[in-house]
Structures are given as structure tokens and as C-alpha cells.
Amino acid sequence: MNQTKTLHLQPDANGIARAAALLAEGAQVAFPTETVYGLGADARNGQAVAGIYAAKGRPSFNPLIVHVPDVNAARALVEWTDSADRLASAFWPGALTLVLPLARGHGLSSLVTAGLETVAVRVPHHPTAQALLHAAQMPVAAPSANVSGRISPTTAQHVLDGLSGRIAAVLDDGPCPVGVESTILSLAGLPTLLRPGGLPAEAIEAALGSPVSRDAGDAITAPGQLASHYAPGAPVRLNATSAQPGEVLLGFGKVTGDMTLSASGDLAEAAATLFDALHQLDRTGKPIAVAPIPQTGLGAAINDRLKRAAAPR
């Protein structure tokens, strides 16, 4: 990996124009979304996409999400369906990624899809992400802007801590408000939840008027499905009501700790706090114990990330 000076850009007209120009040149640029910071590159340019995998150390069998500014841009890439139309009307722009069959003449690099006949696509809500996508006028492939398998970034400093010198720039617009990655739903067949995330599955089911399958199988068909992922350097122990000797405790609700995700038990607050708290506790160098989190609403996404963070590596 060639070392380069990573530019720290502001979310103003000049910063967005510079970020868009870098993307057009085939460079990799980190940018904020409402969920986490993404590491973007031109999804049509195989060499630019390869630079994402190289910067992150990401396995090439793990596909990427393509970010676009609106539904029309998404429809140019995929075979659109009535269910996609219903969900896009309800939740786009927002924290929902849809996996759909590739359209004829889509123009995307095969590295984006890891050779699959489907692609994950999202319209982010964050105003800076929207401004960048409109300025760049290209589909932007963007996984989370962190070293592969490590804690996801919810601030520009998190990005720089892991990728400084490995990417061209980071566009800094403060903390991400949702704090966990998008929910991924496959519509290539029976609607199937591939990854819980910032949009609760219950809301998707309400919009569709029917349940979605939770059985995604073992194949990697979308980002965020690796068993070990989102991991600190130290071991993670789940469902802890107190710390063992030498551990630091991440609390929730009535379980108080060295830090807490939400003292009031608010799952939205916990999701927004999760990755930053893991970053801070990881810097102690001590094993991390985590309080129990309810498996409802956003709790499903939080528990998914924690389970992967605690998985054998």
C-alpha cells in the first residue's frame, strides 16, 4: 500500500467539489452517511474499487453497497420490482439497502458485486452524502471506512485512526446520527433480511404488509455477513451484568459500566453510541464486557454487531 497524505475536507462547497473530483480521478474518499462513514470510489471503475479492498484489507468475496442520490439512479442499475418501489417510497432516502438483480447494461465493476448477479443499492439521507453523490454524478461503491473486520467509524477521526495515509481524503461532517450500518434486505426472490441495521425489520414488514424471512443462509451475498466483524482488538464478552477482574464494562439501562450505551435504555441512543464507545474502550487495551441488549427494534442490529465483534477471530 503506497502511503499518501489523507486530506481532511470540510463539508462545504469547496470540500464537496474536491471530494467529487478525487472520486472522478479514481481515488478513495471517506464520507459521512446517517449510519456510518463510508469509503467511496467510482463503482464503474474496477481499479478504483480495487483500491477500496486494498485500503481496508477487505476480502474480495465480500460485496459492496452502491450509493446513489435517488430512486431513478438506482433503477438504472437493477431490475426494479413493486416491492422495491413500495420500500423506496417509504424509506428512501434512509438506512435501508436493497439487494436486487443487476439490470442489463448496469456498467458496474464486477468487483462491486463480488461476481454475483445481484447488487446492494442504497440512497443515503445524510445531506453531505447527498451533496457528494449529486456532485460526483456516478454510482459510488462504499463499505464502512475502517480496516476490514474492525470497529466501524462514526466520526472522521475514527476513519483517520484506521486509514490515514491509505486513502485520498475524508469529508468530515461530525458524528453519524444513526450509528449502525443500514439494514440490508434481499428482494432477489422471497424478501429476506440479510443484515439487521438502522431500520428495524418490523418497519419493513409493516410497509410490505407481510413478514420477511430471517434465514439468509450461509453464502455471502451482501456486506456485514462475515462471522467475525466490527471487532475491537481486545476480546468481547456479551450479556454481562458486571465486569470480571481486568475487564471494562459497557453498560446499558440498569447495568452501569465504565461507559454506557444508554442509561435510560433507549435503543436509538445505544445504536448511535455503540461504535464510538467500542473505539474508546478498545483504547484501554482491556477485554470488554457488554451488558445485555433487548432483541427488539434497533436492538436486533446492536446485538448483531456485538455478536460478530465477540466471534472467534
Image: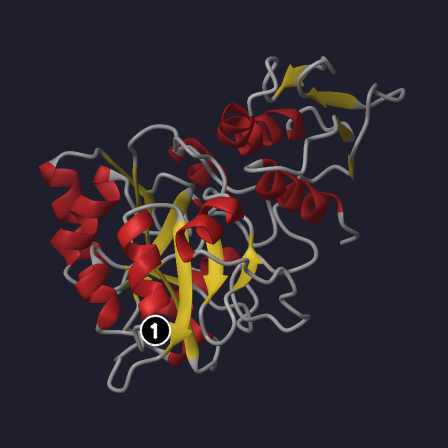
Relative horizontal placement of residue 13, taking residue 193 as reference (left or right): left
Give the percent coordinates (x, y) of residue 259. 64, 16
Is the C terminus in the top left, top right, bottom left or bottom right quadrant? bottom right
Total numbered badges shown on the rendered structure: 1
Instruction: Determine the image quadrant of residue 164.
Output: top left
Toward the viewer: 208 or 136?
208
Q: Secondary structure at mark 1?
A: helix
Say if residue 178 shows up in the picture: yes
Task: Give the vertical position of 301 relative to 2 (above or below).
Answer: above
* Amino acid on which disc 1 is placed: Gln
Toward the viewer: 196 or 26?
196
Q: Identify the residue shown where x is 52% and y is 48%.
A: 201
Relative horizontal placement of residue 256, taking residue 56 as reference (left or right): right
Q: Identify the residue shown where x is 39% and y is 33%.
A: 176
Say if residue 3 shows up in the picture: no
Q: Identify the residue shown where x is 34% and y is 77%.
A: 109
Q: Residue furthest front?
A: 209
Toward the viewer: 234 or 187?
187
Sort mark 1 into few (<14), some (14-19) or many (20+) by Cα contacts within 10 Å: some
Q: Residue furthest bottom?
A: 104
Task: Give the vertical position of 189 relative to 196 (above or below).
Answer: below
Relative horizontal placement of residue 21, taking residue 153 as reference (left or right): left
Task: Give the vertical position of 1 relative to 147 (above or below).
Answer: below
Toward the viewer: 175 or 272?
272
Q: Which residue is mark 1?
A: 47
